Image (cartoon, rainbow, N blue to C red):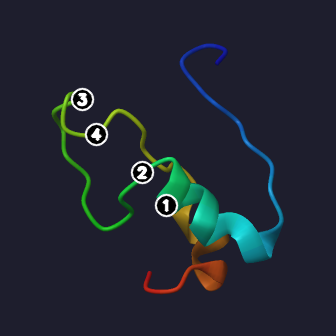
């Protein structure tokens, strides 16, 4: 991580599986950091490759 950000590159077909593996919930954004340590900042960029977004 650098500057509080983790940048991960993956193939489009594997985007959903990467998010699942990292336990990133794309449907629920909680303001409490303890609730979800990782958040997705570019959902609109990858939405077309996700199953239920």
Q: Nearer the viewer, residue 37 or 3?
A: 37
Left or right: where does residue 3 sit relative to residue 52? right
Instruction: Return the residue nearer the eye: 24 or 47.
Output: 24
Q: Which residue is at the far top?
A: 3
The residue identified by callout 3 is: 33
Q: Residue at x 44, y 81 (%)?
A: 53
| Residue located beneath label 1 in the image | 20
Residue 11 point in image, percent of width and height:
83, 65
Which residue, given by chain and number where applicable, does mark 2 sit on?
Answer: 23
Residue at x 63%, y 30% (from the top left corner): 6
CB-based contact (under 8 Å), mark 3 and mark 4: yes
Residue 8 percent coordinates (x, y)? 73, 42
Which badge, 2 or 4, is on the more N-terminal residue? 2
Give the class, few, some or many, for how many residues have Cα within 10 Å of label 2's Cα (few <14, many ≥20).
few
SS for dot 4:
loop
The CA distance from mark 3 to mark 4 is 6 Å
């Amino acid at each position: 991580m650098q500057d509080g950000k983790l940048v991960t590159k993956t193939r489009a077909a594997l985007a959903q599986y990467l998010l699942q593996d990292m336990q990133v919930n794309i449907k629920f954004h909680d303001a409490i950091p303890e609730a979800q340590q990782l958040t997705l900042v570019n959902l609109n960029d990858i939405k077309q490759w996700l199953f239920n977004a």
